[in-house]
Image: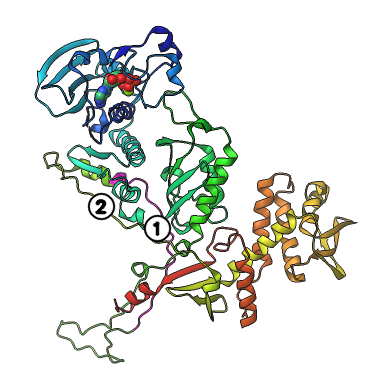
Amino acid sequence: MIKILDKHVADKIAAGEVIDRPVSIIKELIENALDADATSVTVEIRNGGKSYIRVTDNGCGIPADEVELAFKRHATSKITAAEDLDAIATLGFRGEALASICAVARVELITKTADAKSGRRVVIEGSDVLENSAIGCPDGTTITVRDLFYNVPARNKFLASDSSETRRIVDMVSRIALSYGDVKFNLINGNNKVFSTRGNGNILNNIINIFGNDMGRDLLPVEASSKDFIIKGFVSSPASSAPSRNKQIFCVNGRVVSSNILEKALDDAYKEKLFHGRFPIAFLFLAMPPEKLDVNVHPTKKEIRFDDPYEVSDFVARAVKDALTVKESVPQIRHENIKMQHVEASKPKDDGYQYTFNETPAEIKEIKPEPKLELREEHELDINKILSTMRKDVESKVDEPSTLTAEIPSAFPFSFDDLIIKGSVFNTYIIAQDDENFYLIDQHAAHERVFYERLLKQYNSETKAKQTLLIPVNFNVSAQVSALEETWLDKISSIGYDIEYFGNNTYLVREIPAFMDLEEAEGFLNDMFRELEDKPDLTNKRTLERIITKSCKSAVKGGDHLSEEEIASLMKDLKACINPFSCPHGRPTFIRMTKYEIEKLFKRV
Ligand code: ADP
Ligand code: MG
């Protein structure tokens, strides 16, 4: 039953429901539909929602005698007492969304409860009820909002272009549709379907229906549980990252949230697996005891606070890391990404002249597969597609909602023990296979990974495994670097070097880390010093990390022929790594091609 909240309660609620743009109206209307237990919600927009928004649901409807009350400020059927605020289970509860929308747009409500014989149609402008009459309609509620800000033209100028308002709407409805996988969503822009979901709770199908088939292709399933947490969802394999966080969607207890903690957990899981400026794609659904989190009573309700952020981020990071230690996470060469070059010999032109060939014409002179590592740029929500459909004939019929389905991508645990080494090519790439996959391993990247992890281990351990040099090595540094000695000297010592000042901007190295050979040790130090010239202050952890990863690169030599034993020992070392699939800079150590893809190339399948 809709009641007006008493003032005391109303005041306690974070006030100021601001309808600033179409997307905020749509969000409120969808939340109302979900609160009304709708299992199907259709959102239609025109002109980025500025001229027209219609949200139709099949929820409980509003009883005839309450339809006008629904539009009154602080009218809500959802809470009555201030205490309820803590235990609020519904989405909207401020009792002012409809009132606020009416204040800035022309609103029409058509609604019917299941037990009513007919529905009601209410037309409201401002606080005037222009119409309230009986109407035949299906159960549920349709709210149409026209001409946003018709009465406050000044607010119009704060709106963005139609396309950018559309983009916001598509983004928001996508998120909600994903988080409410059991609810059927349709989003229609003008006369065109943007997406529709089936409401059958299949997360992957929803992802594909919302973001397209390509998106689904490289996703890896995440699934884990502990005493307090359950996580489900999908993340991108490291080879198919995105240029922004745009495609990271987190739902906690069924609610789309933004959370630095979860973003950070994700970053942790992909640490060193991605290049700088690339972000994982993630659709993660976390369930946890509600008493362990605080969804604040803020109008947008997006921020979430965890009582124990570390517990949550550990759990999420571990679950995602596990999801990534599968074969499918190794960048894959796909048949369709390989350019087959069929070089055709020129045919005699039919121009009356005879051309002679020096060579016998061959139909296919050369087949040069050029395997290209697939590092696809992920597209933003395909706004161009949306825009081009917007421009289409407005008279065209709305598509029947058709939806896509997909199998959950398979994910097989990767094991080094399954690898059979077959040799190497170009003195650079190790060839290996397991049952279903062919692998190339970049010897240099692999070595770099091994080197880097050993270095970090040494850096973090109490005792340093060192070896004494027969003849100490001199390093000459700039005056500036030696002047800032205290910021870097202990760092270098922590790696396992024994280094001391020898006067005249010269340092003497007597001992080097045990795991390095002299050449590596010198290469690493040389590079450190070169980097220190630019940034002599290593107290910043970031700088230190960056310099260390950079210096690893040059320390490790590549392109040498490795003997069978050397390959075996490199693979053994790589196996011992925490993160064997990429070098410290995020370049892959492994790439993979399935037997099936190879068979496709040979047209066997
Ligand atoms: P709130 O959602 O905070 O209660 P609103 O202004 O959004 O406030 O809605 C006011 C009331 O109108 C709701 O409490 C609910 O009873 C009713 N209502 C709004 N939208 C719907 C809907 N789609 N289906 C059923 N009831 C609705
Ligand atoms: Mg509401």
- Among the 4 quarters of the image, the one containing residue 355: bottom left
All told, the count of numbered labels is 2
SS for dot 1? loop
Is 375 covered by the magenta stretch?
A: yes
Find residue 404 and name its label: 2
Q: Position of residue 490 (x, y in %)?
A: 81, 51
Is 405 covered by the magenta stretch?
A: no
Q: Residues within 10 Å of mark 2 (few under 14, many from 20)?
A: some
Left or right position of 278 against 348: right
Left or right position of 184 against 250: left
- Given residues 125 and 303, the one toward you in this image is 303
Residue found 37% across the figure and 14% down from its top: 80
Q: Position of residue 241 (x, y in %)?
A: 45, 53
Q: Position of residue 443 (x, y in %)?
A: 58, 72
Q: Earlier in the sequence, mark 1 or mark 2?
A: 1
Q: CA distance from mark 1 to mark 2?
A: 16 Å
Overall secondary structure of the magenta section: loop
In the picture shown, does residue 71 fall above or below 205? above
Which three-letter amino acid code belongs to the residue tagged 2? Leu
- Given residues 270 and 7, the one toward you in this image is 7
Reading the image, the residue beneath label 1 is 218
Q: Position of residue 495 (x, y in %)?
A: 76, 57
> Please, which residue is most extreme toward the top here?
7
- Given residues 505 and 259, the one toward you in this image is 259
Which three-letter amino acid code belongs to the residue tagged 1? Asp
Quadrant including the N terminus = top left
Q: Which residues are magenta?
A: 366-384
Quadrant including the C terminus = bottom left
Left or right position of 133 against 156: left
